[in-house]
Image (cartoon, coloured by chain):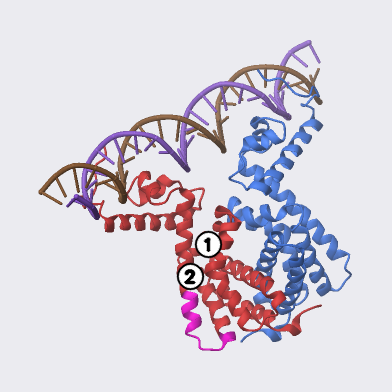
Chain colours: A blue, B red, C purple, D brown
Amino acid sequence: MYVKEDDMPRASAAAAAQTAQDILAAAIDLFSEHGFSAVSVDDVARQAHVTRGAVYHHYNNKLGLFSAAAEKLQNRVADAVVAAAENSGEDPLRQLRTGCHAFLDAITTESAARILLAEAPTVLGWCQWRRMDSENSVVHLRDALEATGVAPHLLEATTAQLSGAMNEAALWIVEGGSADRDAAHEVLDRLINAALDPSTGGP
Amino acid sequence: MYVKEDDMPRASAAAAAQTAQDILAAAIDLFSEHGFSAVSVDDVARQAHVTRGAVYHHYNNKLGLFSAAAEKLQNRVADAVVAAAENSGEDPLRQLRTGCHAFLDAITTESAARILLAEAPTVLGWCQWRRMDSENSVVHLRDALEATGVAPHLLEATTAQLSGAMNEAALWIVEGGSADRDAAHEVLDRLINAALDPSTGGP
DNA sequence: TCCTTTACGTACATAGTGTATGTATCCTAT
DNA sequence: ATAGGATACATACACTATGTACGTAAAGGA
C-alpha cells in the first residue's frame, strides 16, 4: 500500500507543473552524470520523488524525457550566446567572435556538454538532433558567418566544421582543466580567422 | 530442435576464427545501419547464422562486440591515412595535408562514420573511446602537427579542434552529397593553414 | 452537485541482456 | 590410440527495464 510522503495536494495545475519540472531536473542531473542508457526511468522517478507513472504521464517515453532535457539545456546555452553577442556591439565579426567564445564557456558549464554534445546525437538520432541543433544553436553560427561575408558555397561546410571544432573543444575542456580552456580559446580564434580569410585557402 | 544448415565441421580452430569474423562483419553491418541500441545480440547472431551463444562466446558481451567492431573500422581508416601520408613524400606539411584529406575520404566510406564518430564515444564511454582514438587515429594528427611546428602549448588544443572539425565534416558529408565533399575539403584546407600559421592568431 | 479531465500510482506483458548448463568436437599428452 | 581436458558452440533460465493498460482520487467547470 502506497502512502504519500507529503500531504501537499499534488494534483493542482501548478503542482503538476512543478512535478514535471522536478522530473526534468532529475533527468538532467542523472543523464549528465551517468549517460542515457545507464539511467532507468525508475532512477529518475526516485530522484524526483514520484513513481514511473508520473514520468510517463508528463513525458510520453524515455526518449521524450531525454529530448526535453536536451532542449532545455540547449535553450540555456543559446540564451547565453545570444546575450553575449548582443552585448558586444554592432560589428558582425566581433559578434561572431564573442558568440563563439560564449558558446564554449556556456556549454562547458552546468553539465550541458555530455548531454548535448556526446549523447544527444546518438540517442535522438541524427535527423531529430540536426533539426534541434539547427533551429537553436548552429543557426546563429551560420547567420554570423554569413554576415561576415563567408563565400556562399562554403557557408554550410564552414559552419559544420567550426561547429565541430567548438564541440570537440568543449568536450576537451570538460575533460581537462582550466589551463586547457585558455588554449582552446586561443586556437578557436585562429580557426575563426581562417574561416573568414579567403587568402588562407588552398595549399 | 536445431539442425545445422551446413554440415561443415564448425568446431575446428580455423572455422571458429571464421565464425568470429562472420559475427564481427554482421555486427559492423547492423550497428552502422541501425545503431547500437536498436540492434540486439540476437539480430547479430541471426545475420551471422549462429545463435546468441556463439556471440557471447567470442565476444564476452554486447559492448565487447561493439568495441571490436569499432576497433576494426578504426584500423582500416588508420591504415588508409598512413598509406596516403607515406606516399605523399617527405615534407611534413604535405604529409599532414594529405593525411587529413585521406582521413576525410576514408571515414566517409564503408559506413565507418556512424559507428566511429557518432556512436563509439557514447557507447564505449569517453575514457575508453579517447584511449582507443588516441592510440590509433588522433595520435597521427598530433604527431603531424608537431612535426610542422605548432606551438607546444597549443598542440593538444589544436589537435582536438582540428579532429573535431574533420569528424563533423565527415558526418556532414555522409548526410549530404558529393558536392558537399569538395566544399568540405576546401574548408578543411583553410583550417589546417590556420592551425599552422601563428600570424592568424588573436583578434 | 455532477461529470469530465487531469495527475498520478499499480500491475502486467514483453523484450533484451547475461549467465549457467549441456553437448559435441578438437587437441594434447601419455 | 585413447583418455581427458579444452574449445566451440546451442539451449534454457533469471533478471532487468521499458511501455502500456488500468485504477483512483482530486480539480475545475457546467
Task: Find residue B116 and name its label.
Answer: 1
What residue is disc 2 on?
B77
Let me know if residue B176 appears in the view. Answer: no
Looking at the rendered image, the quarter that the C terminus of chain B falls into is: bottom right
Lateral position of residue B178 relative to residue B43, left or right: right
Marker count (numbered): 2
Decide which of C14, B70 is in the foreground and name it.
Answer: B70
Which element type, helix, strand or loop, lies under badge 1? Answer: helix
Q: Element at badge 2? A: helix
* A187 lies above or below A7: below
Q: What stretch is highlighted in magenta?
A: B80-94
Q: Residue at x 74, y 49 (%)?
A: A72
* Residue B42 in which image quadrant: top left
| A56 w.r.t. B9: above or below | above
> Dot 2, crowdedness within 10 Å: few (<14), some or many (≥20)?
many
Q: Which chain carries label 2?
A: B
Image-based side of B108 in relation to A203, left or right: left
Chain of the residue where label 1 is placed in the rendered structure: B
Q: Is the magenta stretch mostly helix, strand or loop?
A: helix
Q: Between residues B34 and B199, which one lies in front from this camera angle? A: B199
Location of residue A188 in the rendering, given as x and y in whole percent from the top left corner: 73, 72
Q: Is residue B161 left or right of residue A13?
A: left
Residue furthest bottom as drawn? B90
Amino acid at the residue labelled 1 = Leu
Please tell me which of labels 2 and 1 falls first in the chain.
2
